[in-house]
Image (cartoon, rainbow, N blue to C red):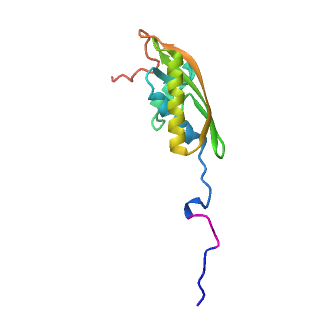
Amino acid sequence: MTETVSQTSQPPAERGRTTIADGVVEKIAGLAARDVVGVHALGSGLARTFGAVRDRVPGGGRSVTRGVKAEVGEVQTALDLEIVVDYGVAITDVAHSVRENVILAVERMTGLEVVEVNIAVSDVKLPDEEEEEPEPRLQ
């Protein structure tokens, strides 16, 4: 009787490829950025306005990727975020915290190396400003 020995030296978990879509990284980064105190919203004013309309369309859902752009390679990713900060916070501290939180979340969840997180602060939310995305009124 002949015994068959596997010719593959790789463990089963390492046979094959895993690819991660840009949108997956964008969602993770968007949620991680929103968790930081001092971040009021993500995206520019125009993007938030269009997003508010889309959010009200049945099935449109809330976009967690608004204001986030990812470029994903095989082992690395780079991210661009556009944020609105609350008035009174130290913008450099908020940007540092966003960058740190996003990198930790993306690297932990995807295994990709985050090579850079570029942050553009597009606006400051003043305490007396009305929300751009008001709650729908019941009639």
Span colored in magenta = 7-11
Residue plotted at (57% across, 20% down):
46
Residue 63 visible from this viewpoint: no
Residue 50 visible from this viewpoint: yes
Residue 18 rendering spot, x and y as whole percentages: 59, 53
Name, please, the residue furthest toward the bottom: 1
Look at the image and tell me in which quarter the N terminus lies: bottom right
Residue plotted at (61% across, 61% down):
15
The foreground one among 3 and 54 is: 3
Q: In which image quadrant can residue 69 be found?
A: top right
Name, please, the residue furthest toward the right: 73
Q: In which image quadrant can residue 136 be found?
A: top left
Residue 119 rendering spot, x and y as whole percentages: 59, 24
Give the side of residue 3 with respect to residue 128, left or right: right
Q: Is residue 69 magenta?
A: no
Give the side of residue 136 with respect to residue 110, left or right: left
The foreground one among 131 and 121 is: 121
Residue plotted at (54% across, 17% down):
92
Residue 45 rendering spot, x and y as whole percentages: 55, 19
Name, please, the residue furthest toward the left: 139
Residue plotted at (54% across, 15% down):
123
Q: Where 89 falls versus 43 (above or below)?
A: above
Q: In which image quadrant can residue 130 be found?
A: top left
The foreground one among 98 and 21 is: 98
Look at the image and tell me in which quarter the C terminus lies: top left
